[in-house]
């Protein structure tokens, strides 16, 4: 199935993989409770960024990513989640591998 939408930054048409990536970025960077008329949309990443950078927090971040994308992006299944070390850059780099063998990168923070 082909998906067609507009790039939110350029206004140009985007299809398939680019549309899915834009959707994933939107889901992960939207804090739960901030979308009008759809308060449960988004992810818990915003709440987890100020937590201690340890193994337990990394697992909570991964769980938040998988949970949000399972609920809000049914077009893909996430097979793998890799996180960068946020204390080195101040930003969380999220690398995802989908069931379509696509690699999606999202920077958060």
Image (spheres, grey):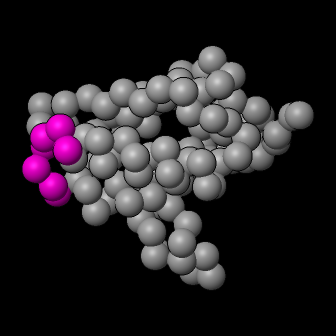
Q: Is residue 59 magenta?
A: no
Residue drawn where x is 29% and y is 42% of the image: 59
As drawn, which residue projects farthest toward the right?
1
Q: In the shown orientation, is residue 95 left or right of residue 48?
A: right
Q: Position of residue 40 (x, y in %)?
A: 54, 72
Boundaries of the magenta span: 50-56
Q: Quadrant of residue 21?
A: top right
Q: Main secondary structure of the magenta part?
A: loop
When asked about the image quadrant of residue 44, the answer is: bottom left
Whether residue 53 is in magenta: the answer is yes
Label tally? 0
On screen, residue 30 above or below 19: below
Q: Residue furthest top?
A: 101
In the rendered image of this protein, does residue 87 appear above or below residue 29?
above
In the picture, residue 7 is in which quadrant? top right
Name the residue at 43% across, 37% down. 106
105 sits left or right of 93 in the view: right
Residue 12 at least partly seen: no
Residue at the bottom extreme, as displayed: 37
| Image spot of residue 61 (x, y percent) | 32, 46
Q: Is residue 30 left or right of residue 86?
A: right
Q: From what the image shows, is residue 26 above or below residue 107? A: below
Q: Position of residue 56 (x, y in %)?
A: 20, 44
Residue at image location 16% in from the left, 57% down from the top: 50
Q: Quadrant of the N terminus?
A: top right
Work out whether residue 106 can be spotted. Answer: yes
Residue 80 at x, y percent in the picture:
47, 26
């Amino acid at each position: 199935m082909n998906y067609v939408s507009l790039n939110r930054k350029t206004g140009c048409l985007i299809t398939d993989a680019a549309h899915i990536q834009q959707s994933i970025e939107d889901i992960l960077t939207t804090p739960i409770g901030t979308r009008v008329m759809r308060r449960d949309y988004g992810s818990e990443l915003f709440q987890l960024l100020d937590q201690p950078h340890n193994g337990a927090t990394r697992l909570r971040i991964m769980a938040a990513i998988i949970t949000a994308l399972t609920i809000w992006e049914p077009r893909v299944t996430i097979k793998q989640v890799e996180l960068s070390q946020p204390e080195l850059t101040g930003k969380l780099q999220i690398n995802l591998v989908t069931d379509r063998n696509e690699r999606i990168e999202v920077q958060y923070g």
